[in-house]
Structures are given as C-alpha cells and as structure tokens.
Amino acid sequence: MGINRDTPGRKPRTRIQKKNTEAILDAALDVFSQYGFRGSTLDQIAKAAGLSKPNLLYYFPSKVAIHRALIDELMQNWLDPLRKMQADGEPVEEILAYVLRKLEMAREFPRESRLFANEIVQGAPNIMDKIEGELKTLVEEKAAVINGWIASGALAPVDPYHLIFSIWSTTQHYADFDVQVRGILKPEGDAHFKDAEAYLDTLFRRMLTPPAG
Amino acid sequence: MGINRDTPGRKPRTRIQKKNTEAILDAALDVFSQYGFRGSTLDQIAKAAGLSKPNLLYYFPSKVAIHRALIDELMQNWLDPLRKMQADGEPVEEILAYVLRKLEMAREFPRESRLFANEIVQGAPNIMDKIEGELKTLVEEKAAVINGWIASGALAPVDPYHLIFSIWSTTQHYADFDVQVRGILKPEGDAHFKDAEAYLDTLFRRMLTPPAG
DNA sequence: GGTTCCCTTGACCAAATGGTCAAACCTTGA
DNA sequence: TCAAGGTTTGACCATTTGGTCAAGGGAACC
C-alpha cells in the first residue's frame, strides 16, 4: 500500500479529473471569497460543486490544499496588470491604463478580489511569503520606474508606493465593498462602473499630470 | 423560575459587570476583526478575555449577541468623521480634514476598521439594514453638500459619491490591508502614516481645488 | 451573622466539522 | 468481454463548537 501515489496531483490527467477539479475550484472560490477560510466548510464547497465530501477529498487532500491551489492560481494573474506597466510608455497614460485594468478586474473578477481581501484582512497567514517576496519585488521595481518618470519631468512628483496603494484600494473597493457600494448607489447592474472609471481617470490624471511647461 | 430576567442587559449595573463586559468586547474585537464572525470561536474570545466560556455566556446570551453589540457600538462612531464635514466651512479644507480624520481612525482603530471590512467583504449579512438606512442617508446628505460647493465654484466638479468611496478606500486601506502595506514598506511602527498623510493630502487637493480664477 | 442576589465554573450535550476507509461502481483500452 | 485502474460514496471517527445546567463561591445589604 504505502503512500498513495495515485492521488491526482495538480495537473489533471483525465477528462473527468479536469472537469471536477475545475468545478471544485470554482465552487471553492465562491465559498472562500464569501466566508473566508475558517468560515468555509468542506460540505459547503462540496455541495456547491455538486460532489460528495469524500469525492472532494479524492481530488484535493485537504481543505487547505484547495485554498492553496486557489491562492496560487490567483497570484499568477493578480499581478499581471502591474507587470504590464512599461517604462517605455507615456508615463501618465501608462499609469492610467493600469488603473483601468485594475478596475476592470474588480468588475470581472470580484470573487478573486474578495478572496484576496479576506486573506489580507485576516493577516495573510498563507501568503505572507508571497507578499514579502514576489509582490514586494515587483512593487519596488515599478516604484523605481515611476521615480524615473518623475525625474524626467514627465510625471508630477509623488510617492510611488502610496500611489500604488491608492490605485489598489480605490479600484478593489468596487469588488471588496461591493455590497456597500450597491447599498448606497442602488445601480442597475454594473452601471456605476462607468462613473467610477471617469472619476478615477480624473483623480489620477490630476494627481499625475506635471505642471504645464 | 421562568425566564431568567436577571441576566445582565446591555447596560452594565455593577462594577464587575462593567469590567467584564468591557473585557469581553475588547477581546471579541481582537478575535472577530482577525478571523471574521464564522472564523471566530467563543473559546478564543473567552481566553482572550481571561474568562471561562460559560462565564462569557453569562454576560452575553450568544456569540451573535457579542458580535451585534460590537457592530452597534462601532456604527455609532464610524460615521462621526463624515458627520463633522460641515457645509459652512471652506470646501476643500473641509474635505481634506475629513480625509485626515479617516486616516487617523485607520491608524488608531485598525481593529474596528477590519471588523467592518470583514463584515462588508462577506456580504454584510448583519448590517445591510444600516448600510441602506443610516449610512445611505448620511452619504446622500453629504453628497448634496458637495454638489452645493461645486455649484458655487469653490470645488472642482466631481462625482460626490465616488469621491467619498475613494476617501473611504484609500484611508481604510492602511488598516484593512495593514499587513500588505507593512510587508512592502517595512516601516518602523507607524512611520509610514506621515507619508500616507502627505500623499493623500496632495491627491485630494489636486483633485478638488478648482481651476484658478 | 445571615440572607439574598450576583458571579463563576466543571461537567455535559448535540450538532457540525475535517478527514478516513473499504467497498462498489464506472471507463477505457486491449 | 474482461481486466485494471480511475471514480464515487455510505458509514464512520475524533475533535471542535455553540450552548446548557446545576451547584458552589462571593459581595453586599440588613
């Protein structure tokens, strides 16, 4: 018998495995993003995925394994918008494009944003290493780019770190605090995102456009 | 015997009751703000309060009662900074003072901010009524004030709702996403709040100051 | 000093939870 | 068609959890 090496690993091998792991991860995203890790149960996830609990545990060895798989997957894509901010573009437009990409992600992937928010608010027990590693490195790199732009006079002087924080917070707010936003604005569908886009464009354009001259 | 009417109510009557209800609420704030409602246990709270679990339940009838007491208490104070924004002040300075007050609250009361954030991210199951009531009313009132300022030319044109959202998100970010901010900046204590203050002052001043003339 | 509340706790309970396991059920390729 | 491996599940388990209860320990007022 020994250690069960037949347990499916990260990469699905059969069609059924692919279908079910996807269903599980999608269901888990629903549940974890709404209740946080400790507030979620395997039964909830199993039910949402249309599987029995032992069946869940056939595909993932434990609750934390499901969570980790989600977080890992998320981290892959979460930083892409920032990575795309290139030093060789027009500074103000590069940053504004980043803002819009983030806002778009908040609209398209609110569950992912909330999964992340839940994790951070609760002290980031599972991703502290990624924050102090990957994320920190990327932010430092882009902060240097921004400082370069400022030095060249193409951007008004700003603290690049707090600029990035304010971009994250203002855009993710529309996903993480969605119920509050909707409770106040009572929008039809995502109608309010157009206004948010216009507002954030103005906010950061005024902040970043260097004095004429 | 009948229904136990001797159970302490909201208002502590004796010195011991006052001391213990306060200890419980403080401990519960610690725990709930870190793990969310469903992720927190009575044992954790009891231990943090230095009481036994049955003793906890002598002062509060249930877990939800503790949570509700905290949320109610929080809601009392949370909206104060916005209430203090007065129509008869100098517009830009009134709003900037509001921003600073919110930032100060994020620094002084991060647990309260995270308690709130946890609740909202998870769909605000217990405070939806307050959001659509008290909060919505207050925001609409202040939005009208801001629109008045804009009409008078003392403020650059902005969507007042999204302005308020951006103030909430940028300031609360320093409490709710504290571990991320610290993971990236590695500040000593609260040193980074000075920079945040300067950044946000600039951000909103540029946004709100009307074109010269 | 005694009585009357107030306060505290050990022992207990039912339900929920993460996880296991052996047996049965399917697919698939030869 | 049949074997071999992949898939599914009912039954089960130990632990945790929110909550109860009766009994004992204190403070305070008479």
Image (cartoon, coloured by chain):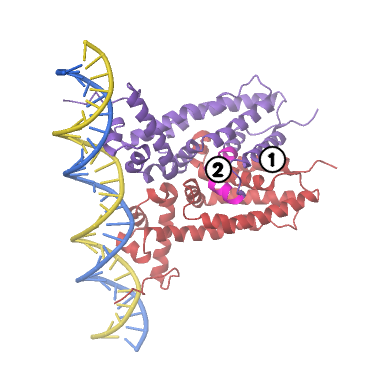
Chain colours: A purple, B red, C yellow, D blue
- Residue A189 at x, y percent in the picture: 58, 42
**Quarter the C terminus of chain A occupies:** top right
- Left or right of B13, for residue B95: right
Identify the residue at image location x=29%, y=77%: B1
| Residue interval drawn in magenta | A169-184
Per the rendering, the mark at residue B202 is: 1
Residue type at mark 1 is Thr
Position of B181 relative to B126 (above/below): above
Co-location on one chain, circles 1 and 2? yes
Magenta segment's dominant SS is: helix
- Residue B136 at x, y percent in the picture: 61, 55
Q: Chain of mark 2?
A: B
Q: Earlier in the sequence, mark 1 or mark 2?
A: 2
Viewer-closest of A202 and A155? A202
- Give the image quarter of residue A91: top right
Residue B202 magenta-highlighted: no
- Residue B162 at x, y percent in the picture: 65, 44
**Quarter the N terminus of chain A occupies:** top left
Residue type at mark 2 is His
Viewer-closest of B135 and A25? A25
Per the rendering, the mark at residue B173 is: 2
Q: Secondary structure at mark 1?
A: helix
- Residue C11 at x, y percent in the picture: 18, 61
Residue A176 magenta-highlighted: yes
